[in-house]
Amino acid sequence: MLARLYMELSANELSYRNSSLLQGILFEHISPEYAEELHRQTMHPYSLYLLKNGDDVSWVIQTLNKEAYDEIIEPLMKSEFDGFHLKKLDTDVKVMSKKLEAVDKKILLQEFNEKESEGDQQLHFISATAFKQSGRIHILPDIRLIFQNIMNRYSACSDRVDMWDEDTLNQLVDSAYIFRHNIRSTSFPCEGVTIPGYIGDVTIRTKGTETLKRYVRFLLHFAEYSGIGIKTGMGMGAVRRADKNER
């Protein structure tokens, strides 16, 4: 199960640059046992980010399997969780409203099997996105790094399906490419350091079989919940696909 919880906050001074502070709030409201389990994982079964539209600020938390939903979203859905204090900013934040969305992973598989591909896939990178490979930070969108990261995330949060496959990844790299982009560099404050990254729009075009095009759509749909790249549990790598009317 994939789930997304929107919480509207009464804190106009917050922006996505404060997202890392919210990971601490999240960990305060999950069980110590599950928190310890998350600390041991290299890829977390959740992502979070702050979404700001004018004066409206929403904290978005997404989970990638049922265990993460039960351990993370369920405690936050309780009426007792109606606000929190951010010590670093010395401010009280009130939760004004909550909205939950959930989709079974079977829906993604059904879409893969039954729905024809729409062609180009456009991604909005909402928060700073970057990749780490061989000890180096990469701050430009790269087809291999994007799909490798998503495949690894799907495998890490699934007990039944191992999405990772080197041959399939090579097919994706050979067939898909960045057709158009409108990105800019940005930075993300995190744990006393500033991580470089990018935000903006990227259009991915895929040549090849219909099956491969559907697979690209499947991975990018999943990425809307998992995020892409590093530090997705702190607010980086948030993405959304554009529908046809937005393209």
Image (spheres, rainbow, N blue to C red):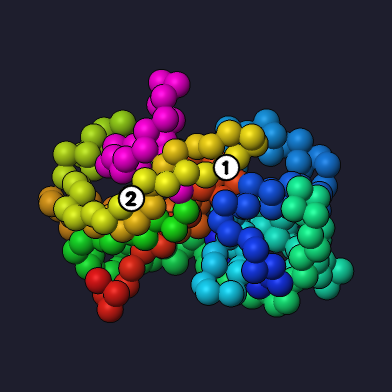
Disc 2 to disc 1, C-alpha distance: 17 Å
| Numbered range of the magenta stretch | 128-146
What residue is disc 2 on? 184
- Relative to the observer, which residue lies in front, 187 or 219? 187
Element on which disc 1 rests: strand
In magenta stretch: residue 129: yes
Q: Does residue 3 show up?
A: no
What residue is disc 1 on? 189
- Relative to the observer, which residue lies in front, 158 or 13? 13
Q: Is residue 199 left or right of residue 205?
A: right
- In the image, what residue type sits under mark 1? Pro
Query: To which quarter of the image does residue 73 belong?
Result: bottom right
- In the image, what residue type sits under mark 2? Arg
Query: To which quarter of the image does residue 38 belong?
Result: top right
Task: Categorize mark 2 by other alpha carbons within 10 Å: few (<14), some (14-19), many (20+).
Answer: few
Outermost left residue: 208
Q: Which numbered dot is residue 158? A: none
Q: Is residue 55 left or right of residue 32?
A: left
Residue 57 pos. (x, y %):
61, 69
Q: Is residue 51 left or right of residue 129?
A: right
- How many marks the image carries: the answer is 2
